[in-house]
Amino acid sequence: MKKTFVILLLLAPVYLAAQDPYYYHTIHSSSLGATYGRTYKGHYAYQLSRLRQLKLSGIYVFDEYTQSDGNRIKADVYNLGLQFQYNVIHAGNLFFSINIGAGAYQIRAGDLIGVKFKETKVNFLGGAQIEYYLKKNRLALLVDYDALYFPFSKLYEVLHVPTAGLGVFF
């Protein structure tokens, strides 16, 4: 009886994997995504392996805030980044991924009295993505969260970029 139980335990992972013959992230597939929040974001992703993607993203953020002295700052942030994305959770049609990478940004800002500011430097990106497939390997709802880290900027240190939209896979 114990031998049978041990053999069944050893074969269980093989049997369970055989129950899901279809996998959404096939090697060498690509995707295009467009998401929106307080920003616009577009990305292209290339599937390197079943769990890893190489992701090229373009982000535009319009930011507006008031400083402690009452001065109002308006800024346009443009970011181009290259990230490695790793799928960490897969449950049916739902995927959760984390990503990390680097990029370049340009900030154009101005205030109420006409002071202009422009900056172009290197930055780092990190974040997470949720994909919920509406149609297998073709169309998915995307929810993205990116944190843009600007270690060399005079205006920002970290900029949080939550977005939601659609992804097309081919």
Image: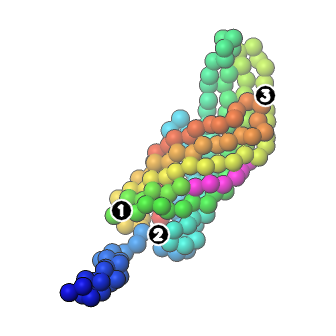
Residue that badge 3 annotates = 117
Considering the numbered disc 2 on the image, is that residue within a helix, a strand or a loop?
Answer: loop
To which quarter of the image does residue 83 belong?
bottom right
Looking at the rendering, which quadrant does residue 100 occupy? bottom right
Cα separation, mark 3 vs mark 2, equals: 43 Å
Could you tell me which residue is drawn at 62 percent across and 37 percent down?
A: 159
Q: Provide residue 1's location: percent of width, then percent of height.
A: 20, 87
Front label number (3 vs 1): 1
* 44 lies above or below 36: below
- The majority secondary structure of the magenta stretch comes to strand
Question: Which residue is labeled 2 in the image?
Answer: 25
Give the spatial CA distance, label 3 vs label 1: 46 Å
Q: Residues within 10 Å of mark 1 (few under 14, many from 20)?
A: few
Amino acid type, residue under disc 2 in the picture:
His
Q: Is residue 82 left or right of residue 49?
A: right
Rendered view: 28 above or below 102: below
Q: Position of residue 67 (x, y in %)?
A: 67, 17
Give the colour scheme shown: rainbow
